[in-house]
Image (cartoon, rainbow, N blue to C red):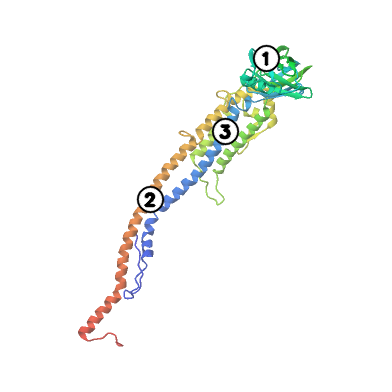
């Protein structure tokens, strides 16, 4: 414990001294023990902030890379175009589609079978007889409550036999319309009727439209389709037939190079953000003080890992290194992307570019492994391990500070009690001296106070 000189004036003044200030002065030297601990703790916490930012940016970089290395990512996306959208329109091109050109001639469209009854003048006319649709017979009588066009239509729809019924009314009267629920030839309706109306006589059915399959040729191969939405002609491609035409329609399936370019730009931006994070830690801040991770070995690990992953990869066919994808490394370690070079590589060597990003040992896979080793992923990421090490040191420092504060708090209580007692004694001295003088005067008759 350090020494403190007490200054409280004359012992007979009765003024005493400031106990709280005196305790603070006595403990100041011991409290200074915590200063280097607090400084070290602040340094570690500043490092934690940077580590957290680096971890976030590395995670963003990992996500941007996954768009390029994922087998179901942008390299699997396809686009399609039709030379005559009045005859054929493209609906979708999935990852299984293969880039290429196809010639399609649409002979005829698919049709859905439909029949309609002869018209009756009164839609509420009572019906009798029976109607057979696709082998299911509807006996029209009051017991089944289907003795009008409307009630018979409802009964047919409720039966669930794969057709839909409705009543159509125009100036010539009302008809019962039956439409197959299956398009193409397979849905051809088979209807027989012995219906009659109370005021209209016999009711017969006529074919409105026969059920027909679409006929088309794809690259010279004849194909039929029960629907005008065709999914089985070109693998992975769905298109809609809109009209028959003797003129060929060209269908072009292409790789989605625009989305690949966007994904590559995102990767470059995310990579550069990490490099700039690292570069910032290699100097001083605006006040001239070293950055929190200046000289930290984790920074060196990040630098060497990222730069090594850029060029320590296997070739894929014609693609030997990242420069052939339009990527170049600047003096500060950041990347620049030349879009024209990338598009040229995609148009001339698409499969090789894909392999350079997705094959085992490729640039994409090597970079993905490197990012996993460097990031904040438990249990082996470099950032994660550095954060764990800091956390351990911070816990030890906080414990030391807590223990020291506990000792100081106990000491403060003891000192305060002792000094309060001393202060009370000092403040009582004048009163005690007066008592002695009074006793002396009583015994000797001598009065020290000449005015008393």
Q: Residue furthest left?
A: 443
The residue labelled by disc 2 is 402
**Helix, strand or loop under label 2:** helix
Kindly report the distance in space between the C-alpha atoms of the residues bearing marks 1 and 2: 99 Å
Q: Quadrant of residue 267 in the image?
A: top right
Which tag, 3 or 1, sits closer to the chain's start?
Answer: 3
- Between 239 and 192, the one nearer to me in the picture: 192
Circle 2 packing at 10 Å, graded few (<14), some (14-19), many (20+), is few
Quadrant of residue 179 in the image? Answer: top right
Q: Can residue 413 be seen here?
A: yes
Residue at (32, 72) in percent of width and height:
427
- Residue 247 position within the rendered picture, expressed as x and y whole percent measured from the top left: 79, 17
Q: For the N terminus, which image quadrant?
A: bottom left
Q: Nearer the viewer, residue 174 or 403?
A: 174
Give left or right: position of 191 versus 170: left
Q: Nearer the viewer, residue 179 or 272?
A: 179
Residue in the foreground of this view, choosing between 296 and 246: 246
- Which label is found at residue 63? 3
Q: Are circles 3 and 2 on residues that touch, CB within 8 Å?
A: no
- Residue drawn at x 52%, y 29% is 369
Q: Is residue 35 left or right of residue 145?
A: left
Occupied quadrant, residue 441 = bottom left
* Quadrant assignment for the C terminus: bottom left
Check the image and report above or below for 165 versus 432: above
Contact, CB < 8 Å: mark 3 with mark 1?
no
Q: How many residues crowd mark 3 within 10 Å: few (<14), some (14–19), many (20+)?
A: some
Q: CA distance from mark 3 to mark 1?
A: 70 Å
As drawn, 26 above or below 90: below
Q: Secondary structure at mark 3?
A: helix
Which of discs 1 and 2 lies nearer the camera? The answer is: 1
- Numbered label attached to residue 129: 1
Q: Position of residue 11 (x, y in %)?
A: 31, 74
């Amino acid at each position: 414990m350090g020494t403190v000189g007490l200054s409280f004036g004359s012992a007979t003044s009765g003024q005493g001294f400031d106990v709280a200030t005196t305790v603070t002065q006595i403990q100041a030297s011991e409290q200074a023990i915590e200063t280097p601990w607090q400084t070290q703790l602040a340094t570690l916490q500043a490092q934690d902030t940077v580590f957290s930012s680096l971890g976030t940016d590395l995670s963003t970089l990992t996500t941007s890379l996954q768009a390029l290395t994922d087998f179901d990512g942008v390299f699997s996306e396809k686009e399609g175009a039709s030379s005559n959208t009045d005859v054929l329109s493209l609906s979708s091109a999935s990852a299984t589609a293969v880039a290429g050109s196809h010639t399609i001639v649409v002979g005829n469209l698919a049709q859905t079978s439909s029949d309609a009854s002869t018209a009756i003048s009164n839609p509420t006319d009572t019906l009798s007889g029976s109607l057979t649709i696709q082998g299911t017979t509807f006996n029209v009588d009051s017991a089944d409550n289907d003795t009008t066009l409307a009630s018979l239509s409802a009964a047919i729809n409720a039966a669930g036999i794969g057709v839909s019924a409705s009543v159509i009314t125009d100036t010539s009267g009302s008809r019962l319309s039956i439409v197959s629920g299956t398009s193409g030839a397979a849905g051809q309706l088979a209807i027989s009727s012995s219906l009659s109306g109370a005021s209209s006589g016999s009711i017969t059915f006529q074919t409105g439209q026969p059920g027909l399959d679409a006929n088309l040729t794809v690259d010279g191969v004849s194909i039929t389709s029960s629907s005008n939405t065709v999914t089985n002609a070109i693998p992975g491609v769905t298109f809609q037939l809109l009209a028959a035409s003797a003129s060929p329609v060209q269908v072009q399936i292409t790789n989605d190079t625009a989305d690949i370019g966007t994904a590559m730009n995102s990767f470059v931006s995310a990579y550069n953000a990490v490099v700039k994070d690292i570069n910032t830690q290699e100097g001083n801040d605006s006040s001239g003080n070293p950055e929190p991770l200046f000289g930290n070995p984790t920074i060196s690990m990040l630098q060497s890992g990222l730069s090594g992953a850029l060029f320590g990869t296997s070739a894929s066919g014609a693609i030997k290194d990242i420069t052939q994808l339009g990527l170049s490394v600047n003096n500060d370690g950041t990347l620049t992307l030349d879009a024209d070079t990338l598009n040229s590589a995609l148009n001339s060597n698409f499969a090789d570019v894909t392999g350079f990003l997705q094959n085992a040992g490729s640039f994409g896979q090597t970079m993905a492994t490197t990012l996993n080793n460097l990031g904040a992923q438990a249990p082996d990421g470099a950032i994660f391990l550095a954060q764990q090490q800091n956390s351990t040191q911070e816990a030890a420092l906080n414990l030391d500070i807590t223990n020291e504060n506990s000792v100081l708090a106990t000491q403060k209580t003891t000192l305060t009690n002792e000094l309060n007692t001393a202060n009370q004694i000092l403040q009582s001295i004048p009163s005690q001296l007066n008592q002695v003088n009074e006793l002396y005067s009583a015994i000797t008759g001598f009065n020290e106070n000449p005015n008393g």
